[in-house]
Image: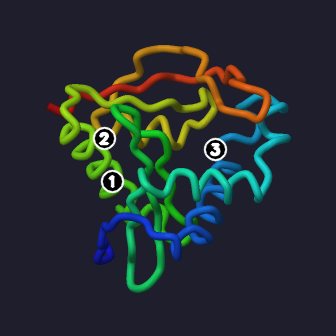
Amino acid sequence: MPQVTLRPATDADADAIADIWRSGWADGHLGNVPDALVAIRTPESFRSRTVDGLPHTTVAVVGEAVAGFVMVVEDEVEQVYVSSAHRGSGVAAVLLAEAERLVAAEGYGEAWLAVAPGNARARHFYERSGWSDAGLFDYPAQTADGPLPVPCHRYVKPVA
């Protein structure tokens, strides 16, 4: 595994985060979420959502490159993405462990996250990392027109 440094995201990381997010989101979501959500997930939407989420974002740095990131809000691990160049390197496990630590540090006993049913790669990763599938639910993806229900699996893990 490469040497991974974790740190809070800064404004200077926004472009790298948005690029990683957009690419990873397409890999895991195209064909697995409603077309209405795909239509609004433009490069600009990833950039604006990245900027809005910076206060909740931790980046993993390998060398001088942002290799991945995690966004944690309260007890939800909202986003976990690794650049295509760093997939399979262990960076995702480092980020997920940090997300679990952050949720526990906020006083929650359990962390949760949402995964599209067809995103088998992510589902297997979370299961190998000790997360349990708590079943299907509709995740309220935020859009300009309000929440859009997206069928997902809710994964949970005790963190206390």
**Residue 130: percent from left, percent from top:** 28, 34
**Residue 73: percent from left, percent from top:** 40, 39
Q: Is residue 81 left or right of residue 73?
A: right
Q: Are marks 2 and 1 in contact (CB under 8 Å)?
A: yes
- Residue pointed to by mark 1: 93
**Residue 53: percent from left, percent from top:** 52, 51
Please tell me how crowded label 3 is: few (under 14), some (14-19), or many (20+) other residues with Cα within 10 Å. Answer: some
Q: Residue at x 76, y 58 (%)?
A: 43
- Residue pointed to by mark 3: 28
Q: Is residue 82 left or right of residue 76?
A: right
Residue type, mark 1 in image: Ala
Disc 3 to disc 1, C-alpha distance: 17 Å
Sequence-earlier tag: 3 or 1: 3
Disc 2 to disc 1, C-alpha distance: 8 Å
Q: Against 122, is 89 above or below?
A: below
Please tell me how crowded label 1 is: few (under 14), some (14-19), or many (20+) other residues with Cα within 10 Å. Answer: some
Instruction: Name the colouring of the figure.
Output: rainbow
